[in-house]
Image: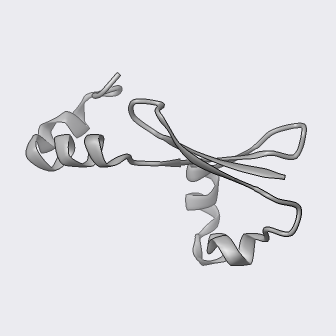
Amino acid sequence: MAVNYICRHCKTSIGSIDGPSVTEQQLGFHFLTPEERNDIIAYDSNGDVTVKVVCDYCNEALNTNPDLLLVSNPLQ
């Protein structure tokens, strides 16, 4: 199972963890509510997991310009 982290705004690959022994407990997924899990985590048919987070660039841009959160796709 590979766990791929991508930015939810700019779709940049942030990193990945590839290993058969990585558990959702180790990644902290068990702390998420069911709604958060549906929004953040996607499971592929081949068993890989995609986790949508915010990269440093987008985080800084959104902190500087919070009005960008009003746009549906602020940082293409």
Front-most of residues 22 and 30: 22
Residue 20 is situated, as x and y percent measured from the top left of the image, at 88, 61
Seen from the viewer's position, the closer of residues 35 and 24 is 24
Q: Is residue 31 above or below residue 61?
A: below
Residue 70 is left or right of residue 14, and the answer is left
The quarter of the picture where residue 27 lies is bottom right
Q: Position of residue 35 (x, y in %)?
A: 58, 59
Q: Quadrant of residue 58?
A: top left
Q: How is the image coloured?
A: one colour
* Left or right, residue 15 beside residue 65: right
Position of the C terminus, as image quadrant, is top left
Q: Where residue 41 appears, x then y in whole percent?
A: 64, 51
Image coordinates for residue 14, horizontal then vertical, percent? 50, 44
Residue beneath the point at 79% across and 68% down: 22
Residue at x 79% of width, y 71% of height: 23
Q: Residue at x 46, y 33 (%)?
A: 12
**In the displayed structure image, the side of residue 72 where residue 62 appears, left or right:** left
Check the image and name the residue furthest to the top.
76
Of 33 and 5, nearer the camera is 5
Residue drawn at (87%, 46%), measured in percent from left and top? 47
Count of picture labels: 0
Left or right: residue 60 versus residue 26 is: left
